[in-house]
Amino acid sequence: MKIAIIGIGNMGSLFAKQLSDHDIYVYDKDEERLKTFDANIITLDKLNDMDLV
């Protein structure tokens, strides 16, 4: 399953960790908030970069 998280604050970080079995797409307009987790996370520069197919 592909899941997009927009805004990776505290709740987004927790959500990404809980869903680490899936492909996680992460976007935040503040690049400093993007962190690396023990999950299959794909950081996005733009929301259009997400491959939905």
Image: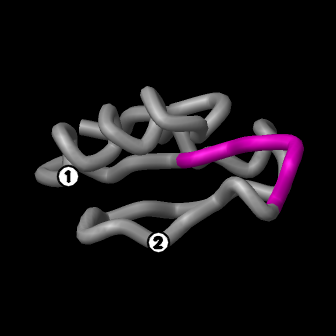
Q: Residue 15's x, y, as percent?
A: 32, 33
Q: Check if residue 29 falls in the magenta segment.
A: yes
Q: CA distance from mark 2 to mark 1?
A: 12 Å
Examine the rendered structure and indicate whether residue 34 appears above or below residue 16.
below
Marking on residue 36:
2
Residue located at (42% from left, 62% from top): 41
Side of 37 where 5 appears, left or right: right
Q: Which residue is mark 1?
A: 20
Examine the rendered structure and indicate whether residue 10 appears above or below residue 25.
above
Q: Check if residue 33 falls in the magenta segment.
A: no
The secondary structure type at the circle numbered 2 is loop
Residue located at (86% from left, 49% from top): 30
Of 27 and 36, nearer the camera is 36
Rendering quarter of residue 33: bottom right
Of 6 and 46, nearer the camera is 6
Q: Amino acid at mark 2?
A: Thr
Q: Which quadrant: the N terminus?
A: top left
- The residues colored magenta run 26-31
